[in-house]
Amino acid sequence: MKRRDFIRTSVTASVVTGTLFSMGKWTPLMASGNGDASKPFLVAVKNGDAISMLKAGMDKLGGMKAFIKAGQTVVIKPNIGWDAGPERAANTNPELVGQLVKMCLEAGASKVSVFDNTCDEWTRCYKNSGIEQAVKDQGGVVVSGKDEGMYREVSIPKGIKLKKAKVHELILDSDVFINVPVIKNHGGATMSLSMKNLMGVVWDRGFWHRTDLHQCIADFASYCKPDLTIIDGYRAMMRNGPRGVSVADVAMMKYQLISSDMVAADTAATKVFGIETEQVKHIALAEKLGVGTTNLDAIKPIRVALP
Amino acid sequence: MKNQKWLRPLRILIGLVFFSGFMIIFSDVRATLPPGMYNFFTSFQFLPSGLKLFTAHTLISIVFIGLVLITLFGGRIYCSVFCPLGIMQDILAHFNFFRLPFKKQRRKFKKALNYIRYPILGAFILTWISLGIVAVSWLDPYANFGRIASSIYQPLFVFLNNGLSDFLSEANSGSLEGIHTVSIWLHPVTLLAASGMFLLILVLVIYQDRLYCNTVCPVGTFLGLLSKVSLFKIRIQNTACTQCGKCQLACKANCINIKEMTIDETRCVSCYNCISSCQDDAVGYRLARVKPAPVEATRASKRAFIKSGLLYLAAVPLIAKADDSYRSDEADEHASEEKQLKYKDRGPISPPGSRGIKELKEHCIGCQLCVSACPTKVLQPAFLEYGFTGMMFPRMDNEVGFCNFECKQCGDVCPTGAILSLTKEAKKKVQIGIAQFMERYCIVKTNGTACGACDEHCPTNAIEMVPSVYGPNIPKVDPEICTGCGACEYACPVEVPHPAIFVAPSKVHGTSKKFVQEQVKWDENVEEDGWAF
């Protein structure tokens, strides 16, 4: 026994909450909300601010009502990993998250929750990213991603290296799941996009890093498919990611990619960013697992350039 | 002596304000209270405030001078209104929480236990001069209260908090204003020290109320000596007193001798119970007449003082020797910079603002306030990492967390200035250690797969992912930029034998260079249609 095991005992009185209830309400491969899963889509919007791009993009898809029925619960998963302000692009743009909450509630959602399993201390991340305030202003709620009692273990049938993971109950229990990553360079995963963003809904990230990061990202994407993925490319972190050092790492891209297909969305993002898609290995690995397609022509992207 | 009955309610009021204040700051497990609130309450703590006078040179240390003046004005007022350990004893005695089988003694006059209290004070001062602050940290009343509050009270608070949090999440409300599950760590060292002291105090309270303050507490004894020359003293007016004995029954310090109608001001904690209890208005503050102390008493206390000094001097070599391990470490401070340190031998990392291990050990009293206020919980009390003379002092434990780059809470709340309050920019440059990368344990080498967890977490870009022969990029550390925050070590997924990257402590803190790069450029690589795809 190591000495520190002896001299320290963790005191955490978190009790397993809610595990007895609402099991298996959400079936992974059918979690396409109310959209038509058989028809993948990709909308690319550029040259606007986060809010106007979201409005323009969602208009092309028939509005938020196409994805949310009245009374449904919604979970939004932005990147809130870091104790940094919006200008640093380390986290998703708070304006975008706030607008999303607003549109979900307008579409009739009964409750909109926002969370991330952050890297820096979570209350500081929520606060300093501006996301907490933006969400509250629009009537959504922010939920802790740092309470292990809120995670439940699931198995990943298609996983090659990642066979099971502990997933946040909001992802498992909400009716609609919206994934809102931000475009970032990443030291380990090459790029942090929509599939990489899903690392923030699981409890133990260390296993992914330890085992095979790219494969685990792809494996998890085969299990967890958001109803809607909205990649925030208003500001993008071009280097030193995913945390970044200063605003010098950030470019004003003024892009937004809205898709039902994470593989397609991530492929498009690499092209906008200016990197070969193959360099981001988990994209091809996920395609192999049937998560989506890298063939953007097949998906017929809708392009909107705002004036 | 009329019109002094208001003193007792006032004493109770201020005492409760201070006690509640301390309970609130030790309940601030998420560090959401402004540091000013911490500073307000701790600045009234005698010893920490005195220490801060020398470390931080801040305006708030004027309070220390005020405390001395108050004592010279009206005796040990400090012990009843500002000292949380003293107020805690009053509360324990008042509510009589712990009814033990033996019956509480009827209060009566007791002689002062000079042969205990003066040796303790003497040893306290001599140890401080020769060995450093170690004895101070064990005996200071505020430090002891801090340990009791953080090791006994706080876990109970967190337990209730988490229970409530679970209840609320069942009830389906989970906003940030709500209550959230918190994890804290219990350390046997602080828990033992706190429990031991708490039990001792409890037994003494049950036996004789403020006996602890008048025998063990060095600050109490010191203020008692100051009280000898205070301007106003509580006295019994011979002409008005009927010797009913009510004041003696009310006295928590057992220092009223009703037969002789005297009050021992060195033990009186200024609780004013006597003043309120007197129906003849015979007890109260009076301007003290300068009167030479009885010769015999002075001699006795001097003798005790000298005896304690000798006893102590005999013990010093033993303790000093026991702590040699730390001292010899310091000698080869520079010799070890070149070679790689072993993970288990690397020694403790001291928090940013403490300037280094030596400085920390000169000024810390181990009150655990920084540990309690640290939002990431990376600050943990040391066991023997700093040596015997550094037990319970804060150290960075990167297994628990890592230092948040933007945070400087520990320095902002430290009551003694052992951790200085730095500006944010200065804090971000303090180098408390340097990350050391051991390639042979890295995932990229052992597994041949991409990882980058350390690079991901590094706030300063001291870690760069560079091409490697193993396939994926591998980390490379720039020691000049590294601050030693421990984020890389915490994030490193390697568990056996230890993280592949870990912080080698700087015994004397350095300054890291700021990483500066030119503004990045991005141009969309568009095709004819104006789109990238």
Image (cartoon, rainbow, N blue to C red):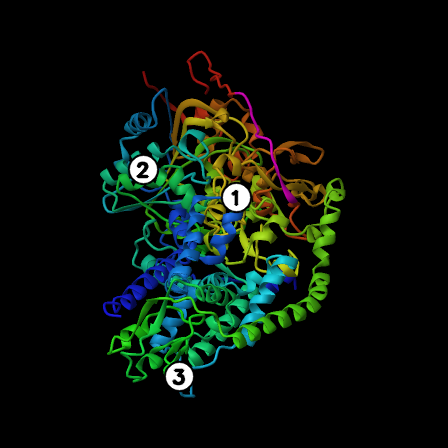
Q: Which residue is mark 2?
A: A134
Label 1 resides on the chain identified as A
**In the rendered image, the vertical position of residue B368 relative to residue B341, given as above or below:** below
Q: Secondary structure at mark 1?
A: helix
> Whole-percent x and y of residue B36?
39, 47
Label 2 resides on the chain identified as A
Could you say which is closer to the camera, residue A163 or residue B520? B520
Is residue B240 part of the magenta span, yes or no?
no
Q: Could one spot residue A17 in this view of the protein?
A: no
Q: Which residue is mark 1?
A: A219
Q: Are marks 3 and 2 on the same chain?
A: no
Could you say which is closer to the camera, residue B270 or residue B321? B270
Disc 2 crowd, CA 10 A, few/some/many (<14, 14-19, 20+):
many
Which region shows up in magenta?
Answer: B507-518
Q: Are marks 1 and 3 on the same chain?
A: no
Label 3 resides on the chain identified as B
Cα gap from disc 3 to disc 2, whole angstroms: 65 Å
Disc 3 crowd, CA 10 A, few/some/many (<14, 14-19, 20+):
many
Give whichever of discs 1 and 2 has the lower sequence position: 2
> Whole-percent x and y of residue B211?
46, 75
Could you say which is closer to the camera, residue B336 or residue B211? B211
Query: Residue B171 shows which numbered tag?
Result: none
Q: Which residue is mark 3?
A: B108
**In the rendered image, the vertical position of residue A99 relative to residue B323, given as above or below:** above
Cα gap from disc 1 to disc 3, whole angstroms: 77 Å
Is residue B517 part of the magenta span, yes or no?
yes
Query: Where, quadrant-wise, is the N terminus of chain A in this rendering?
Result: bottom right
The quadrant where residue A129 appears: top left
